[in-house]
Amino acid sequence: MAVKDIIDLKEQVTSLGSSLYIHNVAHKDAKVIQLLRRAGAVVVGKTTLHELAYGANGDRSTNGPSRNPYDRTRISGGSSGGSAVAAAAGIVLLSFGTDTAGSVRVPAGLCGVVGFKPAYGAISTSGVFPLAGSLDHVGLFSRTTDDAQLVYRLLGNAPR
C-alpha cells in the first residue's frame, strides 16, 4: 500500500507536501497503519499531496505535482491525488488518503478508481495531521470495490 504524506509512518518524514515540515519525522505509525501492518500489509511509500492538504487540484507540493495517470497534462485532483494516482497506475493495490472536503472523492473520480470515504470516526485519525478535526476522515483508494471492502473489513469496520 501507499500512504498520503499526511499520515505518520514510524521513522519517516511526514512533510504534508510543505517545506515547513521537511524535518518532521514521525515517532510511531498512525493507528490505521498499525492495524494494517498487523494484518500483513506492506507500505511501499508515501504519496504526494496538495501542500498542507489544502487544495483541490494536487499541483502544489514541495514534492512536485501529482499528474493524472491517463493524461499527464491534466490534474489528478487533490489533496490526495498522489494516492489516487498510485492506485490507478497499478503501483499499489491500495492507497490511503484523507478527506476533509472532497480530497478522496475528487481524485478518485478524476483518476478512475474507487475512492472510499467512510463514516466519520470509522477509521482512526490518530497519527494523521489534522486539517479540521471535526471534518477529517481517513479514506482509501483501490481499483475495485472488492479490494476496498476487504481492507475496510481488516480494519474491523465493514459488515461481513
Image (cartoon, rainbow, N blue to C red):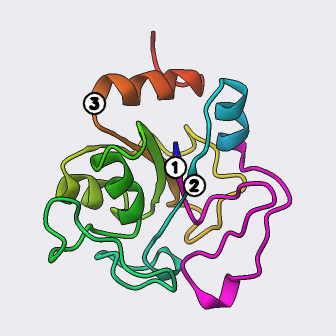
Query: Picture coordinates of residue 120 (x, y %)?
Result: 50, 46
Q: Name the residue under label 1.
A: 2
Work out whether residue 72 or residue 79 is closer to the camera in this orientation and state it.
72
Identify the disc placed on residue 59.
none
- Residue 47 vs 95, above or below: the answer is below
Are the residues flagged by discs 2 and 3 in contact, CB closer than 8 Å?
no
Q: Residue at x 31, y 75 (%)?
A: 56
Q: Which residue lies furthest to the bottom in this view?
A: 20
Type of amino acid at the residue the image marks with label 3: Thr
Contact, mark 2 vs mark 1 (Cβ under 8 Å): yes
The dominant secondary structure in magenta is: loop
123 displayed left or right of 146: right
- Asked whether the residues under the numbered discs 3 and 1 touch, taking CB atoms below 8 Å apart as contact, a structural biologist would say no
Task: Specify which label sits upstream in the sequence, 2 or 1.
Answer: 1
The span shown in magenta is 2-31
Relative height, residue 147 to residue 112 (above, below)? above
> Is 137 in the magenta?
no
Residue at 34%, 75% in the rendered image: 58
Q: Is residue 5 left or right of residue 99?
A: right
Mark 2 and mark 3: span between their CA atoms?
21 Å
Q: Whole-percent x and y of residue 125?
A: 64, 52
Residue 28 lies in magenta, yes or no? yes
Q: Which amino acid does label 2 sit on?
A: Gly
Q: Is residue 75 left or right of residue 14?
A: left
Q: Name the residue under label 3.
A: 144
Residue 45 location, quadrant: bottom right
Judging depth in this view, the residue of 30 and 136 nearest the camera is 30
Residue drawn at point x = 18 percent, y = 49 percent? 112
